[in-house]
Image (cartoon, rainbow, N blue to C red):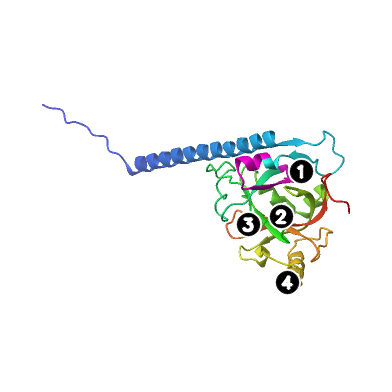
Amino acid sequence: MSKAKSHKKISALDVVRWLLLLVALVAAVLLVKRLLEYKKGQDTYKDIASQFTAPVSAEADVGNALLQVDLEGMRRQNPDVIGWIQIDSLDLSYPVLKGPDNAYYLHRLPDGSYNASGSLFMDANNTGFEDLHSIVYGHNMRDGSMFAGLLKYLDPDFYTENGGEIIVYTLDGIWRYEMFCASQVPPDSTLYTIGFGPGQAYDEFVQNTIGLRYYNMGVEPTGEDHILTLSTCTGDGENRVVVCARRAERLDASAEAG
């Protein structure tokens, strides 16, 4: 008498378990890939900082400790580099680039390689930091890098404890900016208007921007001031977090008298 061959039936529960395992493995691979990408971005910016920046002095009294920034050296590698932004309260120190459009550096490092971190980049329709209103964009990265720290300024206690000083290094000099507005706005907000000349339209823009702030930072810009807006995503895909600052003074030793 021949023995009947037994076949193990695969139950629906087994199929679900294998599918869940497969999903978990794919998620793990994607997570590792993203973490490696984050690390590459962090390492790249550390290398840039070590190669092209150095502290002016080991001792700082108050505010941001100034840097020596070799913008010309960076521009020899990539002429799209137009400046450097430093916010010590956020441990933020990065080059600023300006590409042919507002998508080019969204997911590119300064060397042109693809990376989720992207670069800090000025609005392509700006001419530079000398515009009355210039905008710099950056990602709100989950690892806290790039412009993720800007969200801290939505909390007035953070501003009270840390101040709101921004240092901008340009080819024309080193400038100190004072924050006057932290807010959330929709992507189509009039805050993203640039191309102003002196006059009533710009005066109204400055006053409207003041009206957007979550709380009073004690700084009141006027139509005589240059405004810098830093912009990042909130994470919900709908709104943007913005921090606006007025240009206060020139800090480099080569500044013109007066």
Residue at which label 3 appears = 123
Residue at which label 4 appears = 201
Amino acid type, label 2 = Phe
The N terminus appears in which quarter of the rendering? top left
Residue extending farthest to the bottom is 200
Front-lying residue, 59 or 72:
72
Residue extending farthest to the top is 1
Percent x, y of residue 19: 39, 42
On residue 88, which mark appears? Answer: 1
Q: Is residue 204 left or right of residue 193?
A: right
The C terminus appears in which quarter of the rendering? bottom right
Say which residue appears at 38% left-offset and 39% top-offset. Answer: 18
N-term-proximal mark, 4 vs 2: 2
Q: Is residue 14 left or right of residue 225?
A: left
- Characterize the local packing of mark 1: few (<14), some (14-19) or many (20 or more) Cα atoms within 10 angstroms: some
Say which residue appears at 71% left-offset and 61% top-offset. Answer: 133
On residue 129, which mark appears? Answer: 2
- Can you tell which of label 4 and label 1 is closer to the viewer? 4
